[in-house]
Amino acid sequence: MIVRRCVTGSYVVAALAACSSTRTSAPAPNVVNGSEDEVSLTTIADAQGFVGTGQAGAIAGIVLTDTPRYCALVKSKPANECGWLPASSTILWAIIVVPGATTVPPGTYTHNTLKPGHLDSGIQGTTATAGFAQFDGACNSLIAGRNPPPTSGTIAITTSSSAGVKGTFDLTFPGGHITGSFDVPVCDAFDQVAAPGCTMNTSAYCG
């Protein structure tokens, strides 16, 4: 899932990964266990995070993916393509928003799905959301229901700073259960200003 800053102060959720052209693998603390609709993330080629503030408050996000150098790929796309994913990709993302704060404090956050739209206008309190998606080479979704969000779960944050984001997740989906941990650096690619009209989508799209 990408977390991308818009000129409106909005953030976009879709997918992100490597910010360094020299880094092609994620460190050992990044683990994804389980599956959704018999789809799993067996190889984590990259893992990245995002921290920032906007009109919505403090935001911390993480992405685990089998797509190497995804951040660099996103940089090559037009700014208004918020949520783009390449074909033959798998991604797990989580994002937490705390209104009125400057940083996301450590804690366990209960998953609650945001409706598509501008993130800043949709926040009604502390929000945690996550997703899991996989596409084949023709951009067909390999998860029933076109990558539905979790039905319940938690995202626990132990560290959220400019140095990185660390924690765990426990998510129940319509077709499975996924747990894991993350300890990721911050990817600066998603701190760049995007085009007007860039909205938050709780489902990634392939193109």
Image (cartoon, helix red, strand yellow):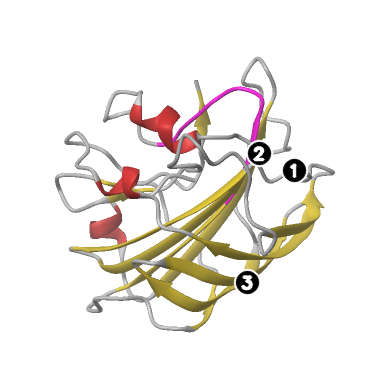
Q: What type is the residue that disc 3 sits on? A: Thr
Residue marked by disc 2: 66
Answer with left or right where residue 80 lies relative to residue 164. left
CB atoms at circles 2 and 3 under 8 Å apart? no
Q: Is residue 198 visible?
A: yes
Disc on the earlier residue, 2 or 3: 2
Compared to 160, does 151 lie above or below? above
Relative to the observer, which residue lies in front, 186 or 58?
Answer: 186
For discs 1 and 3, the disc positioned in front in the rendered view: 1
Disc on the earlier residue, 1 or 2: 1
Compared to 26, does 53 lie above or below? below
> Is 38 covered by the magenta stretch?
no
- Kindly give the residue lying farthest to the right in the view shown: 38
Residue marked by disc 3: 168
- Mark sitting on residue 43: 1
Relative to the observer, which residue lies in front, 47 or 200?
Answer: 47
CB atoms at circles 1 and 2 under 8 Å apart? yes
Relative to the observer, which residue lies in front, 147 or 4?
Answer: 4
Other residues around mark 1 within 10 Å, as few (<14) / some (14–19) / many (≥20): some
Residue 143: where, in percent of width, then height? 72, 37
Residue 88: where, in percent of width, then height? 66, 25
Numbered range of the magenta stretch: 83-92
Disc on the earlier residue, 1 or 3: 1
Residue 21: where, in percent of width, then height? 46, 34
SS category of the residue bearing label 1: loop
